[in-house]
Image (cartoon, rainbow, N blue to C red):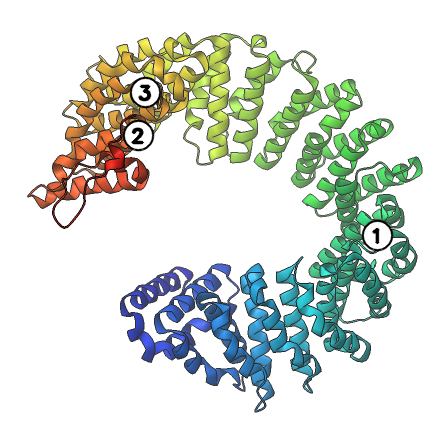
Amino acid sequence: LEDQERHLLVKVIDRILYKLDDLVRPYVHKILVVIEPLLIDEDYYARVEGREIISNLAKAAGLATMISTMRPDIDNIDEYVRNTTARAFAVVASALGIPSLLPFLKAVCKSKKSWQARHTGIKIVQQIAILMGCAILPHLKSLVEIIEHGLVDEQQKVRTITALALAALAEAATPYGIESFDSVLKPLWKGIRTHRGKGLAAFLKAIGYLIPLMDAEYANYYTREVMLILIREFQSPDEEMKKIVLKVVKQCCATDGVEAQYIKEEILPHFFKHFWNHRMALDRRNYRQLVDTTVEIANKVGASEIINRVVDDLKDENEQYRKMVMETIEKIMANLGAADIDSRLEEQLIDGILYAFQEQTTEDVVMLNGFGTIVNQLSKRVKPYLPQICGTILWRLNNKSAKVRQQAADLISRIAVVMKTCQEEKLMGHLGVVLYEYLGEEYPEVLGSILGALKAIVNVIGMTKMTPPIKDLLPRLTPILKNRHEKVQENCIDLVGRIADRGPEYVSAREWMRICFELLELLKAHKKAIRRATVNTFGYIAKAIGPHDVLATLLNNLKVQERQNRVCTTVAIAIVAETCRPFTVLPALMNEYRVPELNVQNGVLKSLSFLFEYIGEMGKDYIYAVCPLLEDALMDRDLVHRQTACAAIKHMSLGVYGFGCEDALVHLLNYVWPNIFETSPHLVQAFMDAVEGLRVALGPIKILQYTLQGLFHPSRKVRDVYWKIYNSLYIGAQDALIAGYPRITNDPNNQYVRYELEYNL
């Protein structure tokens, strides 16, 4: 089945379960056979859907049915069936609560009949811990007691799964619950001294998760003991063992009781000898784990201790290995800064990152992040190396590969702030001119990065010192606004907005007008970030050249045929009103409503809707001015007029809540209310929104008084609509309605009068 089809079927089964309830019992096994495999699907959403169905099934069929149905699968010969059954049982436990399943688990884990049953029982405990996280804490002791005997089982597989289950329980319980694990510390301890291979790996994993739960002094003692075995296992060729050893070293180094001195002397020499090699860089999971562990050790022993050992590897011939070194140094410096890096190490670092940056064959984000972070952390200390760094960047901006050019431009935007800190304005000016010359770039990804770099430079150098001057730069950006690529659009608008905000006087008003029209098109972009940047830029431009010119052209734009264009225009009008105050816009806008053309009038109403949404509580000064216009719109024969007017009233009433404009709002409510029986879904929605908004501003009792007349009407169609409004009222303001319910006198059997509401002090 396709994903979509499977999703639909799952939903169908869900609905059927809901309808059948306990009648589903005879079919539980059939459903489980189909649904259990979803629990081990690669796709996260498939797993979630599987869990959802099994938990609903458990609630419908009950615990007894689930256990009797799944019991035979627990000691099935097939490993696959046992695995899915264990996962399904974990879901049942989370649906019906762990306590209800404990007696059953106890029996299964002690099963003498077959080791498969014991293995599955313990796996269920592991899956419960993974699925439920910290929710296992109340039952931790009983869960540990159920599985502890598995550590000394004669079957190797049972011992392994027990250790893994303990690790999962400890991970879920972090940082609590060490006292529940008292009984298993001894067998685990014996185990790591006697076992080898897979079994040892699982036991080490369990101890690795238990050490962070201990008090500092115990953690220190256990770490020293377990370290001897870990250091021996550093040499293990098994990939799985390597991952676990790294994880345990990380956990041990992160605990409080372990001293830095001990790590430096005992662990670091072996650690670097066995793990920092090319082979570790090739396997993705080992690579991740090694970087994380090294960063954790650095947090304990200091940055320079680790960086000193790996800095020369930035010049290694293997690129994947260089990346691993770069990522480690980047994370360490992001965490710990550059305070303990001396001048010799600083030279090696800059030399190394420049080499690694220039020699990369695949341009990805690791080198870029590393370079950016290291330069930013060294800050003022980079000053002597900046000419060399900029030389490299300029040389790479000229490369024939688009990826290289893009990365060089991205790097400029990362280090512009540092160049400012080092007062290298001349260098930045030079970079600005070079980037300006590259604005003819044909690859959109690269052009986007170049615009981003220009933006970073404009930001730090300021408008007055910018080279090329702003008056030359902006005309070059105007045609780029037509580019349809999202990255280019976003960066270009941001840059134009920055200029409009901080240096509008360098550009003529006519040029700004031209840009306004380019921006109108962008208000309908798919990406929200672009629309938001456009909105902001529009505001800056309106502020710069005054609202009148912009407004005249925008109002003309309401006459065009294309709807999308008109909607964008209405948003733009609202932005102008927000940045230049509404009184500059409202007279012209309301005057435009007199044009006897549907599109224009709807556009004006839409603008008012956005306008009140944007200005919020400033609307209290303008509500009386627009009342007559909204009255007219709410009495219009055209549906869309009334719909848009309702939307405007919703925003208006939400904005002026608590500012004493109730008289105007009640007046408008009288015009909104007759639309109650409309059938057009858009208008129904707009009407409900307006009523909800007015509920907030006028208080729910006012709306309740309007609603009571229709709640018990003889016609069902009338009742339906009124109850719909009452229900939304009840959801929104249940407590406030109490005082407004009608009074009913007491009768001989019942007391209806609520005297406490009639007290008068």
Residue 312, image x, y percentages: 88, 47
Residue annotated with mark 3 = 608
Q: Nearer the viewer, residue 172 or 420?
A: 172
Determine the secondary structure under disc 2. helix
Q: Which comes before the other along the chain, label 2 or label 1?
A: 1
Task: Give the quadrant of residue 257.
Answer: bottom right
Asked whether, in this view, residue 743 is left or right of residue 117, the answer is left
- Up/down of 455 relative to 65, above or below: above
Residue annotated with mark 1 = 317
Residue 179, image x, y percentages: 69, 66
Q: Residues within 10 Å of mark 3 (few under 14, many from 20)?
A: many
Q: Nearer the viewer, residue 395 or 283?
A: 283
Residue annotated with mark 2 = 693
Task: Look at 74% across and 43% down and name the residue there.
Answer: 367
Asked whether, in this view, residue 648 is left or right of residue 526, the answer is left
Mark in front: 2 vs 3: 2
Callout 2 amino acid: Gly
Residue 129, image x, y percentages: 58, 66
